[in-house]
Amino acid sequence: MDIIVGFVESPSTVFVNGGKGRDFTSVSFGDSLGTVYGLAVRDFNKDGIPDIAAGRSDAPSVLYFGRIASEKQK
């Protein structure tokens, strides 16, 4: 399971599970503006990979387009 966290005045972060349960790699997206009040996961660009939208106050919303895991991460 992966974990997505939205912050106050800090980039949002996705903690990607390495597949063994306890190993996570963090990927930050966005900037340090505003407060994240909502997160949505959906395939926005229809490439078959989940993407993330972060809705924020006092700053524009941010999209993170998912990537295919490398063979090493599978």
Image (spheres, rainbow, N blue to C red):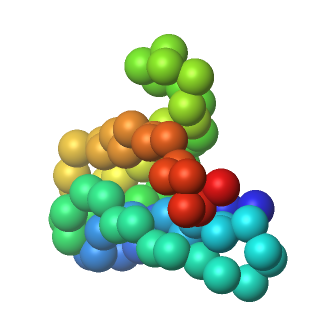
Nearer-the-camera pick, 20 or 53:
20
Q: Residue furthest right?
A: 21
Q: Is residue 70 visible?
A: yes
Number of numbered discs on residues: 0
Tell me the residue at 51%/74% (across/down): 25
Nearer-the-camera pick, 44 or 10:
44
- Judged left or right of residue 70, residue 10 is left
Q: Quadrant of the C terminus?
A: bottom right
Nearer-the-camera pick, 17 or 34:
17
Tell me the residue at 67%/62% (across/down): 2
- Judged left or right of residue 66, residue 59 is left
- Judged left or right of residue 18, residue 38 is left
- Which percent across, then down, holds residue 1? 76, 62
- Which percent across, then down, holds residue 16? 58, 65
Q: In the picture, residue 42 is in which quadrant?
A: top right
Q: Is residue 44 above or below residue 71?
A: above
Q: Residue furthest top?
A: 46
Q: Is residue 54 above or below residue 2?
A: above
Tell me the residue at 21%/52% (across/down): 59
Q: Residue furthest front?
A: 71
Tell me the residue at 35%/52% (across/down): 56
- Judged left or right of residue 62, residue 74 is right
